[in-house]
Image: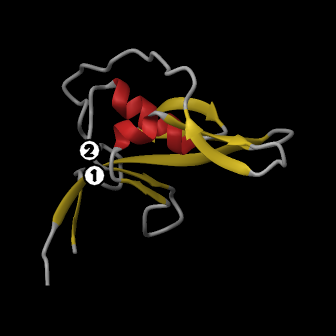
Amino acid sequence: MINRNTNAFRFYIVPKKLDKRHTLYSVIFNGKIVIDRTHLPSAAGCRYLASMGLSGRAEMWDFSRPYARMVFPDLVKAAGLTVEDDDHGRPRVKPLRKPCQAPIHEGPDAGMDNHPSNHERLSMGA
């Protein structure tokens, strides 16, 4: 059996409201709302982490499940993707046409997960 310890940057999503086509979510990192409304929180969360100069594994969590909703082995790669509907209205993952230029977060807490219920970075053993 292989024993692996993996660390991941954890961000959380909270449904904000339902618009005409999508549920809009807030993205929370380090206990702060970093993105107020997005219909694609997975990509937005990864883009935010990448804009802070972070790389590696990321996980998207909510406050109702005891496990991650989505896992991104390479958050920088995930930050370069988006979801668009094809000609038949089916969602498809595609490269982002125009990469977002978000400000880079350089504070001392850049790599910490300070969520009130979890004051350390996620460490999982397999």
| Residue 65 in the image, given as x and y percentages of width and height | 50, 67
Q: How many marks?
A: 2
**Alpha-carbon neighbours of circle 1 within 10 Å: few (<14), some, or many (≥20)?**
many
- Amino acid carrying mark 2 in the image: Gly
- Amino acid carrying mark 1 in the image: Ala
| Residue 40 in the image, given as x and y percentages of width and height | 61, 41
Instruction: Give the mark, 1 or 2, whose residue is nearer the N terminus.
Output: 1
In this image, 95 relative to 49: left or right?
A: right
Location of residue 56 with respect to 34 vertically, above or below: below
User: Mark 1 or 2, which is nearer the eye?
Assistant: 2
Q: CA distance from mark 1 to mark 2?
A: 7 Å
The part of the image, by quadrant, that contains residue 110 is top left
**Residue at left 46%, top 33%?**
80
Name the residue carrying label 2.
Answer: 56
**Residue at left 43%, top 62%?**
68
**Alpha-carbon neighbours of circle 2 within 10 Å: few (<14), some, or many (≥20)?**
some
Name the residue carrying label 1.
Answer: 8
In this image, 90 relative to 37: left or right?
A: right
Q: Is residue 30 visible?
A: no
- Quadrant (top left/top right/bottom left/bottom right) for the C terminus: bottom left
In the displayed image of the protein, which residue is found farthest to the bottom?
Answer: 1
**Residue at left 22%, top 51%?**
120
Badge 1 vs badge 2, beta-carbon distance below 8 Å: yes
The secondary element bearing badge 1 is classed as strand
